[in-house]
Image (spheres, rainbow, N blue to C red):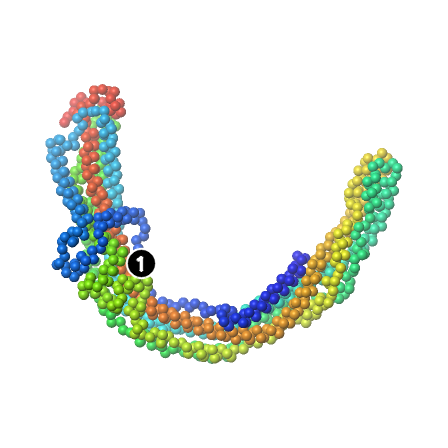
Amino acid sequence: MTRVPGLLAPLLGLGLGLGLGLILNSLGAGAADCRSFGRAERLVFAPAARVRWLAPRDRPPGPLNPLYGTVRRFLSVVQFNPFPAELVKTLLNEPSSVKVDEVVRYEAGYVVCAVIAGLYLLLVPIAGLCFCCCRCRRRCGGRVKTEHKAMACERGTLMAFLLLTTLVLLIGVVCAFVTNQRMHEQMAPGVEAVPETLLSLRGLVSDVPQELQAVAQQLSLPQKRVLEELDGVGKSIGSTIYTQLKSTVYEVLTSVNSLGQALQLSMDHLQALNATLVELREGQRDLEPAVRERREHLLTLLQEPGCQDCTEAQSRARALELGADFDQVSPVDDVLHRLKGVPEANFSSMVQEENSTFNALPLLAALQTANVVKELKKVIAQKPEGLRTLAEEFPGWEAASRWSQALEEVEQSSRPYLKEMQRYEKYRWILGCVLCSAVLLVVVCNLLGLNLGIWGLAAREDPGHSEAKGEAGARFLMMGVGFSFLLAAPLILLVFATFLVGGNVQTLVCRSWESRELYKFADTPGNLPPSMNLSQLLGLKKNISILLAYQQCKEGAALWSVLQLNDSYDLEKHLNISQYTAKLQQELQNLKIDVKNLDLLSPAAHRDLEALQSSGLENIHYSTFLDQIQKPVVNTDVEKLAQELEGLARTQGSSVLGQQLQEEAQGLKNLYQEKVLPQQSLVANLNLTVRALASSAPNLQTETSRVLDNVTYLKGQLPTWATSILRNESECFLTREMGYFSQYVAWVREEVTQHIATCQPLSRALDNGRVILCDMIADPWNAFWFCLAWCTFFLIPSIIFAVKTSKYFRPIWKRLSSTSSEETQLFRIPRVTSLRL
């Protein structure tokens, strides 16, 4: 802490010089960038055309997404042909001229699937009839006639394959249940979204006049903000002056305060140095005779003939004399005399008072600008003529009106069809649940048959077992086979019907919709019939394609840009606000602010600094103090000499001499504690004081001169700087206030050209339609028939394995006679003496 003044002086001088340089630079560059006053704050205008925006619909990711992806890849394999533009064009324009071979060629994959489904529909029921006839003659699904060694392996393999097939059927039917329910749940929101979307599209242009009027009325927002800032313009400009000058003023005041603290600290050190020096000299005068007396007594004892091993102690005793001599240093009374009464001023209170005066600058500026503010408010309260006629002169919307009417008709006519769609969807859901339950019944029969059959096999170990469990298991398996044959026909019919519809929706509509081939097709001249001319329906220019219009609408473009309304409406004429600028600039030139009342240094503080400057504090010979401080108080270590004497006293042959040496050692200890130790403490204090003054005194004089010069310069330049800042801030205030109106003009331009009558609902409706049709309905629909097809085709291996496995669950015609056979050892089946067929 004692080195603070020495380090603070050059730092304050550097900081003050930088502050003055920054002030001069800001005065030269402030008018160009206005950073000192600040830019206009961002205004938040209420959006005039945001209520008609449609929220995007999206299918959240879920566990069924991998299944949907698998189905789409399967359909891509089935339908590998690209979008049939020519075929669709012919179908739309001349339906009677569509060639069947072209349709078959495009639907080749579906034709192959139809052949497979037809074969399944033909062969599986025929196989079921043949199996029934065979069962009636007891030729199929009977029992094993002869027990053999490989029977256990065959039976285990068949049971494993049957169980695996049943698990695959179970997974398929569970997925079918889930996708059937998912499609049923998503159908209702999808249907309800249709009229909602149509109503939103109808409102695309119906509220345009009201929205334009709302845009014009929001001129009150920048007017209100400017009027609020005009109420505080004087205080704001005063605050800006205060902000730009405060770094320099505060640095000067801080340097004054720090210099006052350094002055007080130096005075404390100087007074402490003088008081310590006086005490050291008095202590030195008391210590010198006591040390001399001890040295003489000790030398007399150590030089006696009977003193043993006293040679080294004699040399130490001869060096027992004073080291430092503080009578040789020069006194500081002359410097103290020059600084008598310093500090006269209370620097801390003075700086606080000057800070308060400077901080009141914004209030002073507010009082001086009150009259100018009244004139400025009259100018701001006016409303431009162009904004009043913004809505009245907007061009007509004939094409948009036709579009709105057409959408209203579509919305009204679609409601009955949507209700019918929901009713048929309910029937489809019930049918799907019934068929899924039927497939689940097959799975249950297989699982029950396997469980009972395995239980019956395990029960054969008991000699008195009954074959009822195995027989019941075989019957359950045969029930599952019967259900499988019965379900085959309705399942394959439902699968192919849903596959044909859902697959074509996915490959013909969804795939081309997602890749935007549909838009390109509609955009190509001649593809659509005249009654479906979308450009005329939407009011688009001939040179604007439907795909381009969709892309612009998707990016949030308004009909202003899509229909190119800038050719028929001069928007900039209605946004002219130049009348504000000239009047505001003229009135702001009358602003004036006076800062002559700021005083940075009181007369008393000025006298204190001048006294310090002429005190000669830096001329004190601190080196002579440090030379004496570095010397020991006594040249010999008194404590160590006393310990040595105590040791000599114990080794002497003469008890009298030993007693005398012991007394001398105790006398040296008392001398050290009473006189040497206090003297050493004073020397340590003097060392701190001298070093603090030696490090701070040279810089303190330089800093005093610098502070006095800076205070004088700053006090003379403050009025000039304040006037220059005021002129610059007036221009900045004008720029700031015009910034609010510029924001309003830019917002009106953006709102009219980009947001009002935005066609985003159109593109969002198309995207939502694709999500509803393809992601929310077509994907679960296709996943449902895919899972049913999965179950349908796996019924064939289920039938085969169930028939084969059931044989091993029934009683065996003949068993091996060897009781050591592998089968007998494994299951330990008792011999069957008679069987009832």
Q: Position of residue 639 (x, y in %)?
A: 78, 44
What residue is drawn where x is 56% and y is 74%?
Answer: 722
Look at the image and tell me in which quarter the C terminus lies: top left
Check disc 1 and report the residue beneath it.
Answer: 56
Does 417 sit above or below residue 644? below
Residue in front for this viewpoint, 829 or 510:
510
What residue is drawn where x is 64% and y is 62%?
Answer: 10
Q: Label 1: few (<14), some or many (≥20) within 10 Å?
A: few
Q: Is residue 14 left or right of residue 495?
A: right
Does 757 sit above or below residue 142? below
What residue is drawn where x is 24% and y is 66%?
Answer: 535
Q: Is residue 491 left or right of residue 685?
A: left
Q: Position of residue 95 (x, y in %)?
A: 14, 59
Res 587 seen here? yes
Look at the image and tell me in which quarter the N terminus lies: bottom right
Q: Position of residue 344 (x, y in %)?
A: 70, 68
Residue in front for this viewpoint, 57 or 180:
57
Q: Position of residue 283 (x, y in %)?
A: 80, 53
Question: What amino acid does circle 1 point to?
Answer: Pro
Residue that extends furthest to the right in the rendered view of this protein: 305
Label 1, secondary structure: give it: loop
Does 141 sit above or below residue 247? above
Q: Is residue 243 left or right of residue 644?
A: left
